[in-house]
Image (spheres, helix red, strand yellow):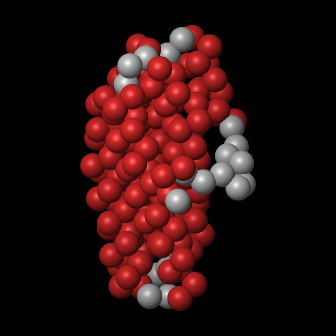
Amino acid sequence: MPPSAVLEREHHEVDAGLEGFLTGLIGGRVDAEALNAALEDLRRHIYLEERILFPPIRHAGMEMPIAVMMTEHGEIWRTMDALAGLVAGGDTERMGALCRLLLDQLAVHNSKEEQVIYRAADTALEPDQAAELMDFIETGLMPDCWECREAR
């Protein structure tokens, strides 16, 4: 399976987790565990892209598209932090608004990423780079203290 297909699958899995949380929220249920799992998956996905995927793609002449993706990652990260911070307070209206915002951000971001960056991954990654990417997807863990650079 090409890297693009595996990375796109992760996008769909994150979206499904967030949509499931939002559906529960609309039904009056705050499933903090489901939200935390979806956010953790998204954080790990961003880590994978920024630490493993983006560097070789950037060096292959995609510096500008990577810069856009990094900026958007920062915006997405800040929305995730704000959403996670609301769970304890129980403000379901605000949680719903932030979850919808996050899903909207991801829809815009992911469509660009899938069409440009992921297609480049299929052609620009050396075999060892593609293997590292796939290994991380299968077994890799994000360091506990890592944060998206643009989130600061």
Q: Which residue is drawn at 38% across and 50% down?
A: 72
Viewer-nearest residue: 82 or 28: 82
**Residue 20 position (above or below residue 73):** below
Percent from the top left, x then y, of residue 19? 38, 62
Q: Does residue 11 appear in the picture of this structure?
A: no
**Residue 144 position (above or below residue 99):** above
Identity of the residue drawn at 47% across and 72% down = 83
| Depth check, front residue: 26 or 82 | 82
Relative to 132, say whether 66 is above or below: below
Residue visible at 58% across and 65% down? 36
Relative to 150, is 47 on the left or the right? Answer: right
Q: Which residue lies furthest to the top in this view?
A: 127
Q: Position of residue 14 (x, y in %)?
A: 46, 52
Q: Where is residue 96 in the image (x, y as percent from the top left)?
A: 36, 76
Residue 29 at x, y percent in the picture? 47, 81
Residue 79 found in image quarter: bottom left
